[in-house]
Structure formats: C-alpha cells, structure tokens
Amino acid sequence: MSAGKKHARSDSEDQSVRVAKKPKTSEIADATLEGEPSTLKADKKKKDKKDKKERKEKKGKKQKKDELEDADQEEDQQDPVAVEAASESKPEKKDKKDKNDKNDENDKNDKNDKKDKKDKKDKKVKKKKSKSAEESTSTPDTQDAVSNDTTTVGPAPTTNDALQRNGAAYSYQQTLALGALSEDEIQAFLKKQEIAVSDQSGTNFRPVLQFSHLPTSTLLSKKPFSAYTAPTPIQAASWPYALSGRDVIGIAETGSGKTMAFALPCVESLASSPKPSHSKKDKTAHARAVVVSPTRELAMQTHAAMSSLASLVGLSTVCLYGGASKDDQRALLRKNTGADIIVATPGRLKDFLAEGAVSLSDVMFAVLDEADRMLDKGFEEDIKLILGSCPPREKRQTLMFTATWPTSVRGLAEGFMVNPVKVTIGNRTRAGGDENGEGNGSVELQANSRIEQKVEVVDPRGKEQRLLELLREAQKGSAKNDRILVFCLYKKEAVRVEQFLERRGIRVASIHGDLRQEQRTRSLEAFKAGTTSVLVATDVAARGLDIPEVKLVINVTFPLTIEDYVHRIGRTGRAGKKGKAITLFTEHDKAHSGSLINILRAAKQDVPEDLLKFGTTVKKKAHDAYGAFYKDVDPSKKATKITFD
Ligand SMILES: Nc1ncnc2c1ncn2[C@@H]1O[C@H](COP(=O)(O)OP(=O)(O)OP(=O)(O)O)[C@@H](O)[C@H]1O
C-alpha cells in the first residue's frame, strides 16, 4: 500500500470518528425506543436529552483538563520521579482509543464512501505532484534552488536517488569554487576537523569549507548565515549529503551547530518542491517537514531557528508542545493550514494527529533531534507512531542528529532510514577502557573537548554545602553575574537545592517537571537575561538548550546515564567557546565511575585518585529480555571476513 493511500485513509478515519460520533449515539438510542408506549417514549426522550446535555458538559470539562495535563507525560520522563505519574494516565487513553475503535466500526459504510472519494482525489493530486516534480527535475535551470555555478570536477556525483524518493526538486551539485580546491586542501580539512563519513554508497561529497561553496538558492541569496564566518564541521560535512536528499546520521559534540545542519537542507528541500494541494474545506494542517524534540524548551528553541530560515522563503512553521493551550496551537495550525514545518514534542504531536488536526502524510523531511534520546525506551513507541504517520522511509528523507550515539539505538535508527550516511565529528575511538588508556570502553562517546572537567569525590551529606562554596568561588568579584547551571537528578531534589541556595542569598531560579510551563519559561528567560545567574535544573534542561555564556555547569547528583553527563556539561563551551564543569561524585554513583573515567581520559582531563578507587570497569548495560549476557553489537558495522589458507 502506498504511503499516500495509507495516510489518506488514516486521516479520513480520524475525521469520520469525530463527525460520526454524535449521530451514532442518537441512532442507538432511537432504536431502543421502538415498540414502547408513547408516554414512556416521551419520558425517555426527555431523559435522553438531559443525559446528552450532561455528557456534553462533562466532555467539555474533561477536554480542558486533558489539555492541561497531557504534556507532562513526555519530557518529564527525564525526571525519574515523573515516570510513575506518566504511566498512570495510560489506561484512560486506552479507553478513549477503544471507544474510538468501536465508533470506527459503526461508521464503516460512511467511511468507505468518503474513502472512495478521497482516494480518487488523492490519485489526482499525486499525478499532479509527480508531473510537477518531473518538470522541475528536467529543468533545473529554472529552479532558484539549483545553482548554475556547478561542475563535475572532483568526486562529487551530480544525481541521486533522492529525487525519486520524495519528489524534491532540489539536487545538490558541487560548485565550481569547491571543485577548484585541491584534494590536499580537502584532506587537510577532514583530518584537522576529525571528520569521518561512512557511506555504503561511496558517494564521497566534498565538505563545504565556506558558505560560498554551497550552491546558490533563493534562501542563501538572503544571507541567513551572515553572523557566522564559516560552516561548522558537522554542517560542512553533512550538508552536501542532506541537500542531495540522502538520509543522514550526524554525530558531533554539543554546541557544534547541529540545528542548522538539519535546518538548512530541510528548508531548501521544501522551498524547492511543489506543495501538494488540498481542498479548501480540509481543516487539517498537512505538514511537509516534521522535527521531533525531547523537551518543550528545546522544541521552542529549534522552532525559532527553523523559522528564521523558513520565513526567508515564505514557509510557515508551527511549534507544538505540551503544557500550553491546545486551542492556541490549534488556531495556529488552522491559520497556517498546511503548516509547512512542524517542530514538536512527541506527546502533543500525537494528540493533534489523533484528533486529525495534523496530518503527516505529506512529510518529505523528518528529523529526530537528540536522536538517541528520541529512540530510547521512553520515546520509542511515540517515534514509531509519528514516523509511521509519515510516508514510508523510501518516500521521505530522514535525518538524525545527536552528540551521543549509543549502540543500543543504532539498529532501531537504521530501521527508520534508507542507506543513511553517517557523519561523525571527532576522533571517537581513542577512549581507553583501563588504567593505561587502552581498550575500547567508551568508543564513540565523547565530551566537548573545550570543556574543562573536574570531578570531586564527596560525602553525600556534604553535597549542598560544597555546592554553595563552589558557587561563591565561581562568582567572586567581576564574575559575580556569571551564569551557572546546577543539575540535580530528581525534581524534589531540585526544589530542595533551590530553596537551600535562596536561603543563603543566591539569586536562583529552577526548571523541572513539577513546575507549570509558564514557570519553566519564566525561569529560563530570567537565566538567559541574567536576572538570575544560577539555574537549578533536572535533566529536562540537559539536552540541546543553547543558553549563551553559561560559564560553569555543576552536577550535584550524577545523571542516570553517561550520555546525559555529556549532554549536561555540554550546556557550556558552545559554539567554539571554552567552558567548565564540576561534578560532585559520591559512592552512590560508583556504577558510573568506569564510563566517567573514560570520558575524562578521552578529553585529556585529570582523573582524581578518589574516582579511580571506585573502579575503571564500564558496567555492561543489561538488556530488558536477555539481562547482562546480552551482547550489544553495532548493527551498522560490517562483519570482518576471515580467510583461512
Ligand atoms: N557556522 C556557525 N558558526 C558559528 N556559530 C554557529 C554556526 N552554526 C551554529 N552556530 C551557533 O552555535 C551554537 C550552538 O548550535 P546548536 O544549538 O545548533 O548546537 P548543537 O550541536 O545542536 O548542540 P547540542 O548537542 O547541545 O544540541 C548556536 O548558538 C548557534 O547559533
């Protein structure tokens, strides 16, 4: 079944559920009245009317409650305490789904009629779409997005399968300027920036060393990167592949410009392809690109970055996230019917998909930001549903970006992609597994090398006092307003630490899952503006947030995973700047000592003797089903062929 058909059907199902709900209840009620005495009948009718009114009122109230409650289920999974609360609300959702399923069956006939009509219409749209895509590929000169300044000099190929995959008219062609560079220059850049590209197709595009090396386009003619001097390594190496329509896995240190690495190709791709048409009566927002983020604040930040590019070429963007009014977001979707780009947290996006306010059946570009987080247990099912609502992987372009790429998510990731190119920045194989720095304990996990990392082994009871000393030390004299981010593991702990600091005269705000969204936003804004120089946070703030000039990150309690440690400390030392991180390590965290030692060694940082005492072995992650004996193999790696003479 084609994606178009599949999704046209699920959209109409959603709609028919909503439209048909009322008539069905009354139909059933009417049927039960047949053959009853007329007075009884009238009484019953009156009673039914009253019941119906009450049901309606109840439904209205419940909907409002849902709107406020729903979102805390997603991002707060990062707060260990929130997990329980989140799972509690699931049965209710299931009930809702069961009811919908029943209605679906009752409405089958209605739906079939609608479906036939919709299929016919879809076929027409599809025909039109492929015709315009054909036209645009065969006449690249007329496309703004395709440069005339192209060449076949150098190893850059000129065509790719992506054109057939998603109907995009944009075709990446290497510019003359880039082709004119010597191979030595290219190799020196790749080596210096520690860029590794793994591509089974052997395409071998050159990295774009300068913005002027990108093919000209309407978007680039508006100079969106005038604030920057050159592409960052991840942008330089991944743009050619992403612009050519390939699926890309991009792994690069925190704060290295990964957002623009996917934002540019996304906007270029949409700007240069025909927009599918939909009936004016169709109130569903048909997104053409979807970016999924693990937290609300990150979704908002990414949305701001995407919309700064998208608005330059007249594309609309909408941000959907929990904890805020659904009505307002629904209104935005309606206003921009066909919101070209949706940046969303999974929970809220799922809600809008379920009610039919959003359709992803036109999506040609899907991005998982913080991809390893999006693919881990907490979000796996949501992502399956969201990507399952998009056209199949052969028909869309899928990009995944992150700073950490544990082997546990790689197999799942590849299942959502077609022959992805893996672009890795940084020498990620040098981490050692033992005292001599040998072995491969933490291969491919790397912290930003510009961050100075200190680890202090402390008594768990003395942590808060030590935190206070560290803050006072760090904000001495002219540094009194320096921004410092303090990480806790639990929401209750964050509340306690915030109160502790407040009582000692520190200007402090906090961000965690127990706060309302307005409070979270207010805290973050105050921290960004410098009104409060200390922000106490749980891991809701660990990933992606780009807060300028965070001078120091302090980990009061070690995070649940070593990946989270890398992301937490990555809130400092961004965009080429230096930063510092101090971690208070206690005996309770000893399970992480081996992996932390590897991270420190890989970044050439001191490893305190006290930490070594906890052991250097990296604890194997136990598999849910197979326990500790499970072998965590990297499915993307080819087996070594051994020949015996
Ligand atoms: N080419 C560039 N030159 C200089 N700065 C850049 C460039 N591209 C992006 N930046 C800036 O770098 C900062 C970090 O970028 P971004 O937030 O995309 O990092 P990231 O790699 O996604 O980090 P994280 O892994 O923490 O999510 C931002 O302030 C952004 O504006």
Image: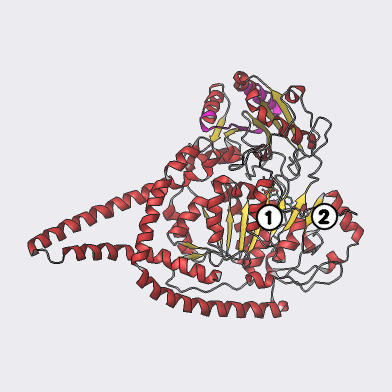
Give coordinates of residue 431: x percent, y percent.
Answer: 79, 39
Label 1: few (<14), some (14–19) or many (≥20) C-alpha neighbours in 10 Å: many
Q: Residue furthest front?
A: 645
Is the residue marked 1 within 8 Å of ligand 1, measured from its CB? yes
Vertical position of residue 318 compared to residue 593: above or below: below
Give coordinates of residue 468: x percent, y percent.
Answer: 62, 22
- Range of residues picked out in magenta: 467-493
Vertical position of residue 552 compared to residue 632: above or below: above
Vertical position of residue 603 compared to residue 269: above or below: above
Image quadrant where residue 438 sits? top right
Who's the residue at 47% across and 38% down the image?
Answer: 84
Closer to us: mark 2 or mark 1? 2
Image quadrant where residue 439 sits? top right
Q: Is residue 232 visible?
A: no
| Cα distance between the residues tagged 2 and 1 | 39 Å
Residue under label 2, please give it.
641
| Residue 484 sits inside the magenta stretch | yes
Image quadrant where residue 275 sits? bottom right
Q: Nearer the viewer, residue 473 or 236?
A: 236
Label 2: few (<14), some (14–19) or many (≥20) C-alpha neighbours in 10 Å: few
For the residues bearing labels 2 and 1, Cβ distance under 8 angstroms: no
| Residue 538 sits inside the magenta stretch | no
User: Mark 2 or mark 1: which comes first in sequence?
Assistant: 1
Identify which amino acid the numbered label 2 is placed on.
Lys
On-image quarter of the N terminus: bottom right
Could you say whether the residue bearing mark 1 is in a helix, strand or loop? helix
Who's the residue at 51% across and 46% down the image?
Answer: 74
Q: Is residue 245 visible?
A: yes
On-image quarter of the C terminus: bottom right
Q: Which mark is residue 260?
A: 1
Could you say whether the residue bearing mark 2 is in a helix, strand or loop? loop
